Structure formats: C-alpha cells, structure tokens
Image: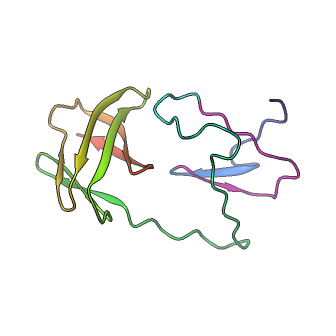
Amino acid sequence: MSGITLTDEKDYTNNEGIFTFLKIPNEKIYCEMTNATFPALSGTKALKTTFTDIGSTPPAAPLSLHPTPDGFRVSGIEQPADVTITDLTGRVVTTTTVDVGGEVPVGHLKQGNYLVKVNERVLKLIKK
C-alpha cells in the first residue's frame, strides 16, 4: 500500500486509542499495526469508523480499572471477560478471565506501564 503519511496533531489526534481526524480525508485511510498482540486489526475492513458532528465528543466508554491491594477490578463488564496484560513492547505478560466484580492479580508484575486488553478494549495500567 502507498499513500501520504498523516501527522499527529495536524491531521488527527490520538486520545487513548481513539483517533479523531481534524479534517475529513479525501482518500481511503490505511492503518497498519505491527504489534502481534492485536491480530484483529488486520484486513481492509477491520476498523470501525464513527462519524460525529464537528465539535461533538464520542460517548465515554464505561469500562474502567479500579486498583485493589493486590491487583485491580474491572468495572463495566456484564459477564466474565478475557483479560490480556502486555508490556509496552507488546509482550504478553498475563492472560486470565475475570468474573463480574472479580479481581485481576498483578503482584507478580514489575513496576511500570502496561496495557490491559478487556474484550477488545485497551486500557492503561501503571504498576507502582
């Protein structure tokens, strides 16, 4: 694939994985993600595009992490959910299933920044 390279803050913004185009593109957009942790982002129609009015904000996602003494709880899930924790290089460090109201232990993780994938949503985790 070929085309122009879009520039962050000029052509689009990125807020926790939600990309907002600052101007409507005239051509098709091709997104390539080289991280094997996210295999669902492949193909020509893998991404959902939601058009909103200028100045409007997409609805806030109800999914969030809440720290506990030994890990975190995930709020906003209505049934057991698959959880994958990766470091910032994309290396999977933990996979588990969490029940509604259940806790994901992270005591074994080193201090640092991680990505938590819950049912195809990705959230940030800072382990202190």
Residue 96: where, in percent of width, then height? Answer: 24, 41
Compared to 42, does 81 lie above or below?
A: below
Where is the N terminus found, in terms of image quarters?
A: top right
Q: How is the image coloured?
A: rainbow
User: In this rendering, would 120 be left or right of 6?
Assistant: left
Q: Which image quadrant is residue 64 in?
A: bottom left
Residue at horizontal 63 percent and vertical 46 percent from the top = 46
Q: Which image quadrant is residue 49 in?
A: bottom right
Residue 69: where, in percent of width, then height? Answer: 11, 49
Compared to 77, does 128 lie above or below?
A: above
Q: Total number of numbered labels? A: 0
Q: Which image quadrant is residue 126 in?
A: top left
Residue at horizontal 22 percent and vertical 51 percent from the top = 98
- Give the farthest residue toward the right: 26
- Please report the bounds of the magenta region as a residue range: 17-33
User: In this rendering, would 119 be left or right of 44?
Assistant: left
User: In this rendering, would 115 be left or right of 107?
Assistant: right
- Give the farthest residue toward the left: 69
Residue at horizontal 23 percent and vertical 29 percent from the top = 110
Where is the C terminus found, in terms of image quarters?
A: top left
Asked whether 61 or 42 is in front, the reply is 42
Residue at horizontal 42 percent and vertical 31 percent from the top = 88
Residue 105: where, in percent of width, then height? Answer: 16, 43
Instruction: Label the magenta part by its dominant secondary structure.
Output: loop
User: In this rendering, would 89 be left or right of 17?
Assistant: left
* Residue 19 among those drawn in magenta: yes
